[in-house]
Amino acid sequence: MWRISKNLITRSGGGPTLKDICSKAAPLTAQTRYNSQSSTKGAPVPEVPSSADVVIIGGGSAGCHTLYHLAKRGVKAVLLERAKLTAGTTWHTAGLVWRLRPNDVDIQLLANSRNMLMQLEEETGLDPGWIQNGGVFIAHSDTRLDEYRRLATVGNALGIENYILSPEETQKVFPLLDPKAFIGALYSPGDGVVDPAMLCTALTRAATKNGARVVENCSVEDLVVEETGKGKKVVGVKTPYGTIKTEKVVNATGVWGRDLIEKHGSFLPLIPMKHAYIVSESIPGVRGLPNIRDHDYSTYFRIQGDAICMGGYEPNPILLDPVAKDFHFGLYDLDWSVFDTHLNGAVKLCPTYANYGVKSTVCGPESFTPDHKPLMGPDTVITGLYHNCGFNSAGMMFGGGCGEQTALWVMNGKPDLPMFGFDLRRFTDTQSRATQWINEKSHESYVKNYSMVFKYDQPLAGRDFQKDPLHDDMMAHNAFMEEKQGWERPGFFLKESAPVQKYDWYGSYGNERHKDCAYERVLDGDLRYNSFSDYHNLIGEEAMACRNNAVVFNMSYFCKLFLEGPDAQKAADWIFTGNTNRDPKKTVYTCALNDAGGVEADVTISRLNSGSGAVHDPKFEGQGFYIVAGGASAYYTYTMMKDEIRRQGFNASVRDVTSDMGVISIQGPKSREILQKIVNCELSDENIPPNSTVLTQCKDVLNNATEYGARLLRVSFVGELGYELHVPKEYCSQVYRSLMKVGETNDLRNAGYRALYSLSSEKGYHLWSFDLRPDDTPLEAGLGFTCRKEGSYKGKEAIEKQRKEGIKKRLVYLTLDDQVPIWGLEGVYRNGEPVGFLRRAEYAYYLGKPLGQTYISKPDGGNIDVDYIKSGEYEIDILGKRYKAKAHLRSPFDLEGKRVLGIY
C-alpha cells in the first residue's frame, strides 16, 4: 500500500521515496499491468443479422448512448462490440458529470445527458449509477474566480443553479478542504458522477426493449464500401460471422476510431494517450461530499464511496500509437514521474488526503483531439458513415447529449443543436492527415484542458501549418498572428516583431521551454476578464483608420469556391436563399439553410461567364459561380455544398481554390482613391456599383513593365466603401506591395482581424457560428431580405411557416454606456428576467462603447415582436454585476447605410 505525504509518497511502514519510485517508473511503451479480462475464447458464436437500418461499432458510452436514442425513435439498430460492453475506455472512466461549461452548446448537451440519467431508472427499472453529489470548482487567483463568475452568469441565464462561495462557505460544503489554500469557489449542486457499467447496462436494456440488438464478442473486420459516380458510400460491415448489409454506420470505437477508415481514404485527427487517476483508502467524512475541480492545479477529486479518486492533466502525458486491439479491460502501470505533478496541489487543498494510502491506480488509454472536443457527424469521404468518438475523457458526461445528436444526424441528416464545435468538418482533410500537427495540438489541448478560457488566447502548438501568400509580408509589418483552421492570419500589428515559435511541448519530453518568448509576452496582455486588453487602443487605431481613412485587411484565408457544371444554376437555386440568377457582374449576399430553416452558411456568390482558365477567371462548361465564405467554416461550407449536390443529383461540382488565391481587402473612405492607382478599370459607381465583380489588371508599381490579373469585388465586411482583390497566389505579394506603396501618401495602413471583427459587429454584420448558427433562421437574425419569394430552396418551407406563424426569438444589439469589457456569454436581463445571453461581444470604437449581440426570447416561450423588444429595460450581467444596456433592433452605426455606398 502506498501512502501520500505532503512532499512524497512512501510505502506503509516505510520504504522508497517518491524519487525512488519515479526512478523505476515504467518506460513510455509500458506493458499492461494485466491483460484483458474479456476473452472471446470459448464464447458462443455470435449471431449477427443479415441487415440493419444502422450498425453502431463500439459498445462504450458513445455507442450505447447512440443505440439508446436511435431505438427510442424507432430505428432498428445493431450494436457490435468486439469484447463486452464498456470495454476499452468506458469501463475505467472517472464518470464525472458537470453542468457548467464556457459554451452554451456544451451546457445544453450536458443538460440533455443529465436529464436522461435522471429518468433512466424509471424508464428501465435499472439504476444507471447516477449520484448527484454536486461539484465545486476551486479558485486560487482573482482571474480564475472571474472566470467562474462568467460561468455563473451564463449558468444563471440558462437556469442552472450555482453559487460563488468564499473559502469558508466552501469548507462548509466540503469540510476537509483547507480554506487558507484558495480564495473562492463556484458550487454547482446539480453535478454528480455516474457508474459506466450500470449506465451502459440500463441504456442497452432500454434499447433492446425498443427493438435494438446488441452483439458482443463480435469484431468488425472492415467496412464494406462501394465506389459510386459521386464518391464512396458504405453498404455494410464485415464481421467474422457474416456481413451485415446497411447504408448507415456509426463509428463509436474511441481510441481505435481511425483503424477502420484509413484504408478507405478517410482520416480522423485523433490520438490515444495514457490517462490516469489513483484511488485512495477509505477516508472518514468523504462519503456524500461534492466532487472537486482544482483547475489551477489541473487536478480533480471524484468521490467514490468513502474514497477519493484523484487525477488530472499533466504537462507530459504519454502518447500511445497504437493501442492493441485486444486491450479490452487492461490497464497500464502508472508512471509516477508523469503523475506526481498532481500530488502537492491535492495535498495542499485537502491536507487530510496526505494521511491515507493509495488503494489502487487506474491508467488506461483515452482518445484526444486537437481542440479537446469530440469528433462527430458525417464522414467527409464515405457517405453513410458517421462518427461519435474522440471524447477527451469526457465521454460519460457528454455521452447522452452527443448520442442523441448523433442519432438525429443519422435519422434526419442534421442535429437539432448547432454542433459545429463538435462536427469533424471543423477540421480540413489536410489537418486530419497531418500526424505531427495532430500530435502537437492534441498534446496542448490535453495540457491546457483546465486552463482559463480567454477569448483571444492563441495556441502555441501546430503553428505555421498553413501560410497564405501574404504571410511573409504580414510578418515584415510586425503582424501578431492568430491561428484559425490551421491558417495563420494577422490579429493586429505591433511596433516590434513577435513571431510564433516552434512548439516546445511546454518543456516536456526533453524539450527546453522557450525563454523570454515575445509571442507569449504579447499573449499575456490579452489574458484577463475584468479589464480591456493591453492592445485595446492599438486595435482601436486600426479600426478608426478604417472609418476615417483606409486600411488593408489580408483576408486570404477566407473560403473561395467555384460551383460549376450544367446544373450549377439549379444547385445554386436550391442551396442558397437569394436570387443568384443575376447579371454576371452582380455579387449577392445570401444564406444556405437546413431543413429547419437554420443558417448553415452565409456567403457572397457571383455568377460568372466562362473565362480564360486562370484561377481567378476559370473556364468551365455550363454555368459557373464564385463563392466566398468565412475561413473558419471553410471546409464545413465546402462539404455541405458537395453533399447537397450529391443528394439532389445535380450535374455540378464544387472546387476549393482557397489555397490558390490571396484576398487583399482595402476598406475605408479613401479606398477608391488609393486602389484606382493600381487597377486598369474605372472604379466609379456606374462602372462598379456596390455588390459587383469585374476582372481587372493590377499594376506592379515597383516593376512598371508588369501587370497582374485579378478579380475585383466591391464588397465590404466592415460597412465602408471598399473593395477586394482576389489574386492568384503567385503574384499576390507583388500586388499587395504595390497597393501599400501607392497608399503611402494617403497613410494607408494594415489592420488585423481584431479590428475587422469589431468593425463588422459595429455595422451589424454577422459572424457565422457566433451570432448566426444552424439554430438561427434568417428571420430571427434580421436577414429575411436574403430569402427570395419565388422558386424553391432548401429550408423554404420552414421560413414560410415562420413568416406566417411568427418567431420566438430575435437578434438584438445591446450597447453599454459603461466602459467595461464584454467577451460573450454574459447573461441578458429584461425587466429583471433572464431573456438570453451575449452570442457575440465587441468594442465599437466609432460608437465609443461596448456592443453585444444577443437573441432575445420570452420566458414563457411565446412569439416575440418589436414592441416586446422596445418596451423592456435591459441589463447585462458582467462578472456578477448588472449594467444597464440599451436595446437596438439594428446596430446604431450608420443606420442609413450611406458609408458603404461611399457617401460620407
Image: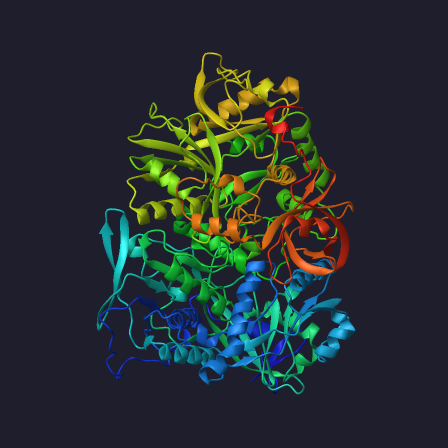
Any part of residue 501 in sight: no
Any part of residue 590 in sight: yes
- Residue 238 image point, x, y percent: 24, 66
Which image quarter holds the N terminus? Answer: bottom right
Residue found at the far front of this picture: 804
Residue at image coords 29%, 35%: 566
- Residue 743 image point, x, y percent: 61, 20
How many badges with numbers are in the image?
0
Q: Is residue 334 above or below residue 597?
A: below
Residue 487 or residue 830, whichever sits in front: 830
Residue at image coords 25%, 74%: 48
Q: Quadrant of residue 473?
A: top right
Which image quarter holds the C terminus? Answer: top right
The image's colouring method is rainbow
- Residue 80 image point, x, y percent: 32, 72
- Residue 508 image point, x, y percent: 54, 58
Q: Quadrant of residue 306?
A: bottom right
On screen, residue 568 versus residue 150, left or right, reads left
Q: Is residue 760 above or below residue 189?
A: above
Residue at image coords 27%, 81%: 41
On screen, residue 277 versus residue 542, left or right, reads left
Q: Quadrant of residue 6?
A: bottom right
